[in-house]
Image (cartoon, grey):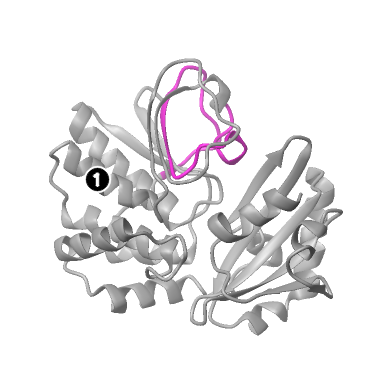
């Protein structure tokens, strides 16, 4: 590819996909040349709902980048979560709201990050800073991403800036946030179509800390018991991943978006990273009030592992 390309992380969620599309739109207008939005995995049902609602095309799927390819990374920075070949690409820009880890470049770059609930909150700021008009479609995609990442502004990752951005984007997109948001989130809770193997990969992030490798995967639902009916087969697939990738820990988090609680299936040699805080019974940890991987689960694991 000769064009600049932009993509989010592997196993993409709504923020990752929508931010790629939005950033491509913004950068195309700022640079005066086409920037191509890409994706590093299949699109989930929640994201499909948002794209269809706002008439947006799916970004093209890529599996690797060639040496010297100019890339923009959104919604992530860790090399363990990004495209194959990233070490030899030219990283031009990063827009992110996560911690910085396992990241390095050989050249200077534009890096824009803040501890907000969603990458799209930062993209809204960049439109303003660059004096670029936000079209209703782009506003709708950014709005969808923020709703997804903050669970309709109920997640502990939500900031005042996210809430203000949602109000402004809702005006541009002419959207009833509560009504649309609930419809979109519920679209993402239809997990019946996925096999257990697909389920544990839907939104899985692989993380490395020194010589320890682990995965924290998360799915949203309106009924945790319904998902746990498949527990035996889910555990079987998790154990396959543990063996195949040499993982010390696999945490599969099932989040109830209505009641803002989670339960997690926890497997591996380092389940103590979770059991030091939450009792694990029959491989399940009950996590009342926990909905955020980034702010609640990941810091816990990093502290204890």
Magenta stretch, overall SS? loop
Q: Residue at x 41, y 56 (%)?
A: 117
Q: Is residue 180 magenta?
A: no
The answer to if 82 sits in the magenta stretch is yes
Residue at 49 percent across and 45 percent down: it is 98
Q: For this view, does 23 lie left or right of residue 197?
A: left
The answer to whether any part of residue 55 appears in the image is: no
Residue shown at the point (17%, 57%) measured from the top left: 136
Question: Where is residue 156 shown, x and y percent of the image?
Answer: 47, 64
Mark 1, residue position:
125
Residue 293 picture quarter = bottom right
Q: Is residue 111 above or below residue 255?
A: above
Which x, y percent locates residue 126? Answer: 24, 41
Camera-side residue of 2 and 72: 72
Q: Is residue 248 visible?
A: yes
Question: Over which residues does the magenta segment extend?
Answer: 60-85
The vertical placement of 204 against 222, above or below, is above
Nearest to the observer: residue 274 or residue 142? 274
Q: Residue at x 34, y 62 (%)?
A: 144
């Amino acid at each position: 590819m000769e064009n600049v390309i932009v993509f989010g992380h592997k196993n993409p969620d709504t923020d990752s996909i929508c931010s790629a599309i939005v950033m491509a739109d913004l950068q195309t207008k700022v640079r005066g040349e086409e920037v191509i939005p890409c994706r590093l995995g299949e699109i989930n049902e929640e994201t499909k709902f948002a794209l269809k609602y706002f008439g947006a095309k799916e970004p093209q799927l890529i599996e690797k980048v060639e040496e010297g390819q100019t890339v923009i990374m959104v919604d992530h920075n860790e090399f363990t979560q990004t495209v194959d070949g990233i070490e030899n690409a030219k990283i031009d820009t990063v827009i992110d709201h996560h911690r910085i880890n396992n990241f390095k470049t050989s050249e200077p770059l534009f890096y824009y990050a803040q501890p907000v609930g969603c990458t799209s909150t930062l993209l809204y700021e960049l439109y303003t800073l660059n004096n670029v008009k936000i079209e209703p479609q782009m506003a709708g995609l950014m709005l969808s991403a923020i709703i997804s990442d903050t669970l309709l502004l109920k997640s502990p990752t939500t900031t005042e800036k996210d809430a203000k951005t949602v109000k402004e984007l809702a005006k541009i997109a002419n959207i009833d946030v509560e009504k649309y948001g609930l419809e979109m989130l519920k679209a993402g809770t239809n997990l019946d179509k996925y096999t257990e193997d697909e389920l544990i990969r839907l939104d899985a992030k692989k993380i490395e800390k020194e010589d320890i490798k682990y995965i924290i995967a998360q799915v949203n639902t309106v009924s945790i018991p319904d998902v746990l009916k498949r527990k035996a087969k889910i555990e079987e697939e998790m154990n396959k991943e543990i063996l195949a990738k040499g993982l010390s820990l696999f945490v599969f988090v099932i989040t109830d978006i209505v009641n803002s609680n989670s339960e997690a299936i926890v497997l591996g040699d380092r389940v103590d990273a979770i059991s030091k805080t939450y009792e694990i019974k029959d491989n399940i940890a009950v996590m009342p009030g926990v909905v955020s991987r980034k702010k609640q689960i990941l810091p816990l694991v990093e502290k204890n592992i």
